[in-house]
Image: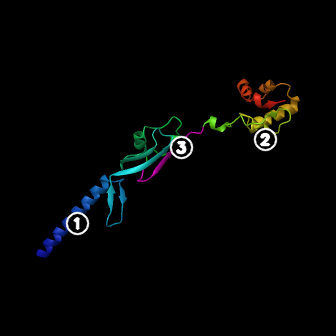
Amino acid sequence: MQHEKLLKYSLLSLVLILILIISINGKKKNAQWVGSNKNTVIKEKITLHLAGAIKNPGLYTVPYTMRYKEVLDEAGGFLDTANVDKVNLASYPKDGQRLYIPYKKSAKKRVRKSYKKISPVSLNSGTSLQLQTLPYIGKKTAVLIIEYRTKEGPFKTINELKNIKGIGEKTIEKIKEYCLL
């Protein structure tokens, strides 16, 4: 009889412990578990390194239940140049993680940055590679310049570049100081 009673209390205790464990796991679904099996601890807060195209990059300590979007809002949000499509804002971060928000690639970055170092190029004898050293002149436009001068003869003025698709007055203004005839 005493043995049966002990067995009932043991089973009841086991069931209660299981219910407690399940309820803790349910509440702490995304908790950060640290340590070995004997010393397992649940961290209530995590520390993240936020970098890139955000208003206030740096280290942040936040509740483990926050998603990336909420963490980034805490950091002041995104810059206008942020490429947020490259980051899963709905996921949960992990302790010690670095989150980098990339910048959008802009047309300004594709343009050569230092025009002062550009050597002048002859429109009438420059190769495709030489013409491509001019600001705003890419591979296709360089080929069009060469095709035009082959068909129409040598350039007589720099303004003749207007006859080439993709080159307008603004482009001519920006490159004329680097063009020779």
Q: Main secondary structure of the magenta part?
A: loop
Distance (Cα) linking label 2 and label 1: 78 Å
Q: Secondary structure at mark 3?
A: loop
Amino acid of disc 1: Leu
Confirm or deny contact between disc 2 and disc 1 (CB under 8 A).
Answer: no
Residue 75 horizontal/vertical position (percent): 42, 40
Residue 92 makes an appearance in the image: no
**Camera-side mark, 3 or 1:** 3
Q: Tell me if 96 is positioned left or right of 145 in this view.
A: left
Q: Tell me if 40 is positioned left or right of 172 in this view.
A: left
Residue 11 horizontal/vertical position (percent): 20, 68
Classed neighbour count for the residue bearing mark 3: other residues with Cα under 10 Å, few (<14), some (14–19), many (≥20): some
Q: Which residue is mark 1?
A: 14
Locate the C terminus by quadrant: top right
Instruction: Tell me the magenta residue range.
Output: 93-105
Residue 175's disc is none
Q: Which residue is mark 2?
A: 129
Q: Tell me if 168 is positioned left or right of 27 in this view.
A: right
**96 in the magenta segment:** yes
Question: Which residue appears at 22% of the width and 63% of the height?
Answer: 15
143 or 120: nearer the viewer: 120
Residue 123 horizontal/vertical position (percent): 82, 32
**Camera-side mark, 2 or 1:** 2
Decide: is 113 above or below 168. Answer: below
Decide: is 139 above or below 32. Answer: above
Question: Which residue appears at 31% of the width and 54% of the height?
Answer: 26
Distance (Cα) linking label 2 and label 3: 31 Å
Q: Which residue is mark 3?
A: 102
Amino acid of disc 2: Leu
